[in-house]
Image (tube, rainbow, N blue to C red):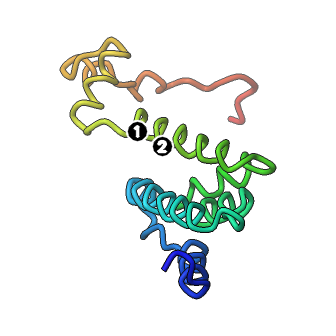
Amino acid sequence: DLADPGASAGRLGAILRYNFGSGDLQEYLCKLSEWEVMVQRYDSANPLEEVSDAVKRTVLMQGAPEPLRSHLEVSGGGMSYDAVRKAVEEYASAKKEWQILPLAESASVSAAISGKTESSSAANDMEVSALTGYKGKGKSKG
């Protein structure tokens, strides 16, 4: 099977047309690992016709979900496959670190940063009535 040119062509076609999923970053990362195993198997079976760096980079970028794809297109031009793969890992790591906090936790963090508690924030809201009677600079048109 490994020496069969038809099987080899079929494996290469599967590598080139690989479906990385529905657009979810975590699914993409899992599928990317599976795809890399396929590429390694193909390269092992076809040492004279290994998948080129440019082909691997192109398939990886085209299969990426948005906005990762745009990020890679902007920053990945001229980079090696390994460098683009590293950029994917860094993007995923940064995305994980900056996920939105749950709403209640987010509100308490915002209050802690501003120095307000929930009871004092309502009392310290901007009072529109403080601006009553303010005419601003310039002459009145009276």
The residue furthest left is 119
Residue at 37%, 16% in the rendered image: 114
Q: Is residue 137 left or right of residue 110?
A: right
Q: Quadrant of the C terminus?
A: top right
Label 2: how many residues lie within 10 Å, few (<14), some (14-19) or many (20+)?
Answer: some
Q: Nearer the viewer, residue 125 or 104?
A: 104
Q: Is residue 136 above or below residue 74?
A: above
Q: Look at mark 2 in the image and give the residue it sits on.
A: 92
Which residue type does callout 1 highlight?
Lys
Q: Work out whether 96 lies above or below 84.
A: above
Image x and y of residue 134, in percent: 55, 24
Q: Nearer the viewer, residue 58 or 15?
A: 15
Residue 112 is tagged as: none
Q: Rounded to the nearest whole Å, what is the CA distance between mark 1 and mark 2?
A: 6 Å
**Quadrant assignment, res 31:** bottom left
Q: Are circles 1 and 2 on residues that touch, CB within 8 Å?
A: yes
89 shown above or below 120: below
In this rendering, would 10 be left or right of 70? Answer: left
Q: Nearer the viewer, residue 79 or 64?
A: 79
Q: x, y (%) of residue 25?
A: 44, 55
The quarter of the picture where residue 96 lies is top left
Identify which amino acid the numbered label 2 is placed on: Ala
Which is more toward the observer, 55 or 11? 11
Q: How far across and down, in percent of the image, does residue 137 sit?
A: 71, 22
- Compared to 94, does 135 lie above or below? above
As helix, strand or loop, the secondary structure at mark 1 comes to helix
> Which residue is labeled 1 in the image?
96
Query: Could you tell me residue 16's position as x and y percent?
Result: 61, 74
